[in-house]
Image: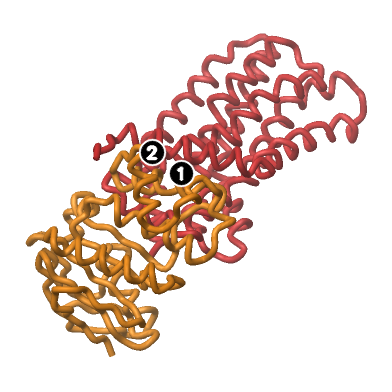
Amino acid sequence: MKKSSMLGLLVLVIRRDLVLAMRRRADVLTTLIFFVMVVSLFPLGVGPEMNMLRKMAAGVLWVAALLSSMLSLGRLFSADYLDGTLEQMMLAPQSLSMLVLGKMTAHWMVSGLPLVLMAPVLGLQFDMPVQALGVLIIGLLLGTPILSMVGAIGAALTLGLRGGGVLLSLLVLPLCIPVLIFGTGAVEAVSTGLSAVSHLSLLGALLVLALVFTPWVTAQALRISME
Amino acid sequence: MLEVSNLACSRGDHRLFSGLGFALHPGQIMQVQGENGSGKTSLLRALCGFLMPDEGVIAWCGKSIRDLDEEYHAEMLYLGHLNAIKDELSALENLRISAGLSGVELDEKAAIAALRRIGLRGRERLPTKVLSQGQRRRVALARLLVSDARLWILDEPLTALDVGAVALIQELMAEHLARQGMVIFTTHQPLQVAGVEMRSLSLS
């Protein structure tokens, strides 16, 4: 019998979560359809005034991405908690933070990445210029993993609580405000002819910070929730 | 070996047990007995490190399990009330993943062999949601066959199992003890392991 390495374990967890997501496709599609619906409703509600739509495009896309990522957070640990897999994960001879990082990555690939890929199509509905679209995509690419990672802390803390979903949003949404500000700020900077580099660098810095700290914090939160 | 001294646990304000002490040496098996609600599961969860005891020390080979953490996890196997298997995955996938989580890379051949021995021949590739309760328990128990952990902590391993499966579990326990393994378990059913003295611990 071969012993698995830390990286092997990370790959195992990601693959497992992706296979599970593929077999429960409805869950994945809910997030994406919610995102598309919310974004598409705005031009209908606000009216076809091009200037106004162009101005609000980035904000609408970001807020919709934020809300739809909240939708899937509740499921991040709850299924594993209910069927006992989480107990086994905590007893893995590797660090729990690594396992948590694997789950976060899989969660982003299932619920964050599709939003990023869908965003350019939706941006066209708002008549966004190509340059702004490009910055929006880069911003979302940097920002959505942060949403998954910060959200995981909330998901771990509210594990097993009744009505945890509302509490989860209350905990996580305020923490995601910086991501929203820098993400929309980058697009606005480009639209007004400035450089988006500063905003994107800050988003990148937030991503690195989140990568370093959130797996550990989430692992601690899980230990508390399991007692 | 596992040494427990002066252990006290409570759930909420209710003190389950206190001043509990025992030692489990290689080749020994211990049954935890007690009524419903006497703290059997809590004791086993404390031994896994899920539950922080109010007082007392749980030591593995002379060191506290809190300090050993992952080193201790590599030497133990816990099977709780919950099977830790996914309905969407097949028995084979479930077994290989749970072995992977416990740090053992299991190839397909070895996994199939284990599932056949546990009595799931022909059901290896079915999604576990179509299996019966007893068969799911067997999928979870197949982990005992592929693990090289020295300490088994089993919480009601016999739930939902038929007579044949119970005999098989007794056989597995005997093999494990012969390899100088250790077993601590709870059950409400009679269980005998040939050739070893069953120690028992009563919680009241």
Question: Which mark is first along the chain, 1 or 2?
Answer: 1
Q: Nearer the viewer, residue B32 or A212?
A: B32
Q: How many marks?
A: 2
Chain that is coloured red in the picture: A
What label does residue B108 carry, if any? 2
Which chain's residue wears label 1?
B
Which residue was labeled with disc 1? B93
Q: Position of residue B17 (x, y in %)?
A: 26, 84
Q: Residue A47 occupies which quadrant of the picture?
A: top right
Instruction: Determine the residue positioned at 38% across, 65% down.
Output: B80
User: Chain B's colour?
Assistant: orange
Q: Residue furthest left?
A: B62
User: Is residue A25 something one can see in this rendering?
Assistant: yes
Instruction: Determine the residue positioned at 19% across, 50% down.
Output: B71
Image side of residue A167 versus residue B27, left or right: right
Which chain's residue wears label 2?
B
Q: Position of residue B50 (x, y in %)?
A: 32, 63
Q: Secondary structure at mark 2?
A: helix
Amino acid type, residue under disc 1 in the picture: Glu
